[in-house]
Image (cartoon, rainbow, N blue to C red):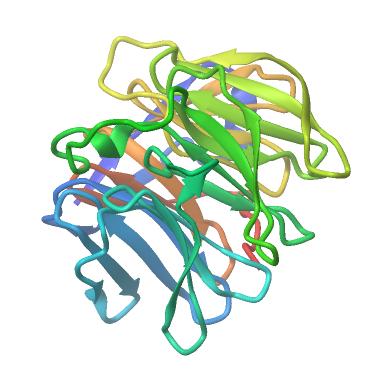
Amino acid sequence: MTTPILDIRDDRLLEVLDTDAQLEVIADGFEFIEGPIWHPYDHHLIFSDIISDTMYRWQRGDGARLLRQPSHMANGNTYDRQGRMLTCEHATSRVTRTEQNAQIDILASHYQGKELNSPNDIVVRSDGQIFFTDPNSGRGPIYGVERPQELQFQGVYRLDPDTRSLTLLVDDFEKPNGLCFSLDEKMLFINDTIRQYIRVFDVTAEGSLENGRLWAELIGQEIGVADGMKVDSSGRLFCTGPGGVHVFDQEANLLGRIMVPQQAANLTWGDPDLKGLFITASDVLYRVRVRIPGQKLF
């Protein structure tokens, strides 16, 4: 099954996608999938199904196979520089690392003696420092386990993987969600699901955030919210939002949208050439071929 998809706002979108680009259904029948990550050497995709408390591994020829259940309602995933999987868990308020021997190690669960809200999305800087968002989405029904919120804010943190220490970087988001670095790692983009915008911060060498400012708004009447966000190898930013995936240039100009029938939650680049854009959209995993590759996670 294929579906036409382009909403062109600027002809430069055609530097990224062909005019006849189409969505391909890779797998379906899920509940609400999130957190896709591509292994650049083994050529497989791992993603979470939050509601079904499951994680899957997809590989060409094998399809989607069960990887982990229960997953503690895992949401966002990434790899560290050693190729170990980092996972944000809604049900346990933890950030975990899956070691090479498959042992699961808890990296973070509390801040100043109080449980984290529900870690959501996660990225790793080239020096190994981990950054993640912590909205309260996993403390409500359907996408988490209902329980009181212990922290009085919804923050963004830096996690030192060696000392396991947490540094609160910013706490004035209404619901922080997706985050990603610019190509040179001098800026960190963080979006807000409730406010439907993307903010950008300057990143210091120590990993602090400065000069936070509004970068772009996600506008549209269709279903979808600010959620997963990534930068491709040319510096263009892709963010889920109303209607599907919004594509911006480096100056925050909207080039257009990749329209998706269901609510698009997250995305990553895969295939051996990293030109397959995988999109998790409610119960369906899609892929669209693009002209510009993504970046390797490690």
Q: Residue 207, how many percent across, how many down? A: 79, 42
As drawn, the residue found furthest toward the bottom would be 101
Is 156 displayed left or right of 261 in the figure?
A: right
Whether residue 206 is situated above or below residue 257 in the rendered picture: below
As drawn, the residue found furthest toward the left would be 29
Whether residue 92 is situated above or below residue 243 in the rendered picture: below
As drawn, the residue found furthest toward the front would be 113
Q: Residue at x 25, y 54 (%)?
A: 73
Is 275 displayed left or right of 139 in the figure?
A: right
Q: Residue 210, how many percent across, how many down? A: 79, 24
Q: Nearer the viewer, residue 278 or 23?
A: 278
Quadrant where the image shows the C terminus: bottom right
Q: Nearer the viewer, residue 13 or 154?
A: 154
**Quadrant in the picture for residue 223:** top left
Whether residue 14 is situated above or below residue 77 in the rendered picture: above
Q: Is residue 24 visible?
A: no
Q: Residue at x 70, y 34 (%)?
A: 188
Q: Residue 40, how many percent across, how many down? A: 57, 72
Q: Nearer the viewer, residue 14 or 92?
A: 92
Is 109 displayed left or right of 149 in the figure?
A: right
Q: Residue at x 64, y 63 (%)?
A: 296
Q: Residue 80, how many percent across, how many down? A: 62, 66
The number of numbered badges drawn on the structure is 0
